[in-house]
Amino acid sequence: MRRALEAAARVRGRTAPNPWVGAAVLSDPDGPRHWNTGATAPPGGDHAEINALRAAGHGAESGTLYVTLEPCAHQGRTPPCAAAIIESGVRRVVVAIEDPDPLVSGRGIAALRSAGLEVEVGVEREAATEQLAGYLKHRRTGRPWVVLKLAATLDGRIAAPDGTSRWITGESARSDAHRLRARADAVLVGAGTVRADDPALTVRLPAGDPDFRGPDEQPIRVVLGRAPAGAAVAPAWELSGDPGSVLDELGRRGVLEVLVEGGATVAHAFHSSRLVDRYVLYLAPALFGGDDARPLFAGPGAPTLADVWRGRVHSVTSLGGDLRVELSPSTS
């Protein structure tokens, strides 16, 4: 299953509105052991199971298929994967998690078992649930998974009093932020940030990097408000409304994961509405040392200690002298 998870990770950010699924086939245990992997192709292409089975060829017969998400059993853009698995001659299927999509939910597993295949569910469930969090949330709520990216000094400031902010963090942290963009379906900023910084919001990593994105693979750029003519962010979706309605619209358009990059007013809007699923903070070993530099959030904060937002730390990583801290709400 870990091979399947690795295959899925390589296509994250390229498959929406389909989930980024990975599959691995172990050849007939009575013959030479051999692995073949596959992952979901962009919309209209084959699902992970089909690609792994095609790579395995006749080696799939009597073998074992590992897949990170329950195989579909309905006709969509492509034929049902469950039928192809049955026809392949695979003897055993190991599924990490069930698919909450009403068109699938248990039907794929039931179809495999009805055909006489041995099916095991729950292997690496936690890892697959984490990896597919965006898809799972979208299918359950209609909204995308929200990641809020923030870069600041250790005293929580994102820009100097004169507005200068490039660069607070170092090159390693900025490269990591590009990887966050690469795995997102959309990147969102406020129109104020577009006017002030004119960001392109593209993934800029060297060719050959696993997260490299060419011109046709870039995430969708989303601006809250109107972008000025000639802005580097163009072409972009221009949306308006409160954060909840914006997420509803993104979900309707098939966005499974959105990266919110700011500025401070937009960050506050999503945070104060409790709509952030994951926070990624890049903290530089620097201090403005006063109260006049610009803070992470622009807007009223918790009025009392009892109302302070509290979460849990997923990881703390050193990136060339900066720290990357990943947090989630304590209830998620």
Image: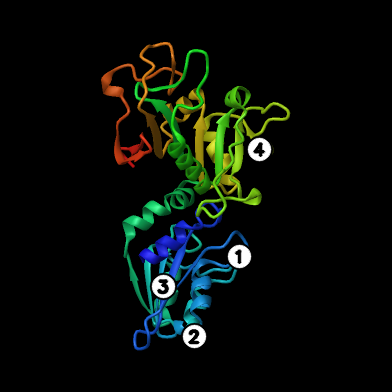
Residues under labels 2 and 1: Cα distance? 22 Å
Q: From the viewer's perspective, is residue 112 above or below residue 199? A: below
Query: What amino acid is found at the position of numbered circle 1 in the picture?
Result: Gly
Q: If you read the primary sequence from the N terminus, does the residue marked by circle 2 or circle 1 appear first?
A: 1
Q: Quick one: quadrant of the N terminus? A: bottom left
x then y, percent, for residue 298: 46, 19
Residue 143 in sight from this viewpoint? no
Query: What amino acid is found at the position of numbered circle 2 in the picture?
Result: His
Q: From the viewer's perspective, is residue 278 above or below residue 301? A: below
Q: Nearer the viewer, mark 2 or mark 1?
A: 2
Q: Which mark is residue 110?
A: 3
The residue where tag 2 is placed is: 58
Residue depicted at x 52% and y 19%: 164
Under circle 4, the secondary element is: loop
x then y, percent, for residue 263: 51, 26
Residues under labels 1 and 4: Cα distance? 25 Å
The residue where tag 4 is placed is: 236
